[in-house]
Amino acid sequence: MASKESRLESWCRAAFDIIQKISKETEENINKQEEDNFDINTELIQEEENLRQSCNSIEKLLRFIYQKYPLPQYREKSYQLPKVITISQEKRLLNKALVHYHPDRNSRREYGLRWYKQCEMITRCINECKKKAAIANWATFENIQRKVYKVYKSERKEEKRFDI
């Protein structure tokens, strides 16, 4: 009969071998994933530049995104944008596109790493476009405020002239 210590040693050796095997497999998987990430990221750099170039108008950006990157959820029937997008619809459609392409809504496991990275890229571009639109709208709003204030000031001056 084997001693208690020898049974413990054989068990420890077997456990140690299993742990080493698992850690080696995990390290290989991590290296493979890093290589895949690098390949995908280098491919997506050019795609992101194309997206940024189409960011001049919101309508152009949305049409480009939905044509070039059709949603996997709508494989049978692609998502259709309205034929004419009004200014009032732009914000709503940008938010809808954010929901469609947000990385949290497009699972890496379900659709793959490449689609997940594309969704991250699209989300970044849509957010940039929203910021540009907000800045442009705010600048327009400030200009309107200035004009209204100037008119108000000039009317007040005229009223003061007549009060005397």
Image (cartoon, helix red, strand yellow):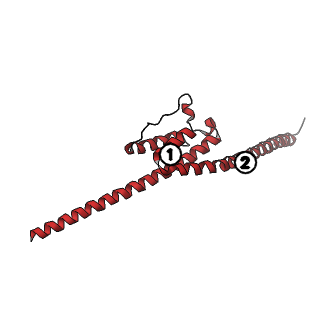
In the depicted structure, whether residue 139 falls above or below residue 64: below
**Amino acid of disc 1:** Leu
Q: Report which residue position mark 1 lands on.
A: 61
Q: Is residue 80 visible?
A: yes
Label 1 Cα neighbours within 10 Å, binned few <14 / some 14-19 / many ≥20: many
Q: Is residue 101 visible?
A: no
The x, y position of residue 160, in whole percent, is 14, 69
Q: Tag count in the figure?
A: 2
The x, y position of residue 13, in whole percent, is 84, 43
Identity of the residue drawn at 42% across and 53% down? 134
Q: Residue furthest right?
A: 1
In the depicted structure, whether residue 37 falls above or below residue 143: above
Q: Report which residue position mark 2 lands on.
A: 35
In the depicted structure, whether residue 157 falls above or below residue 93: below
Asked whether 94 or 86 is in front, the reply is 86
Identity of the residue drawn at 66% across and 47% down? 43
In the depicted structure, whether residue 143 falls above or below residue 11: below
Q: Residue furthest top?
A: 76
Asked whether 73 or 11 is in front, the reply is 73
Secondary element at tag 1: helix
Q: Quadrant of the N terminus?
A: top right
Identity of the residue drawn at 16% across and 67% down? 158
The x, y position of residue 82, in whole percent, is 44, 36
Instruction: Kindly report which numbered mark, 2 or 1, lies closer to the viewer in this rendering.
Output: 1
Identity of the residue drawn at 61% across and 47% down? 47
Asked whether 32 or 145 is in front, the reply is 145
Whole-angstrom CA distance, mark 2 to mark 1, is 31 Å
Task: Give the mark, 2 or 1, whose residue is nearer the N terminus.
Answer: 2
The x, y position of residue 101, in whole percent, is 53, 41
**Amino acid of disc 2:** Glu
Give the left or right position of residue 157, taking residue 12 as reference: left
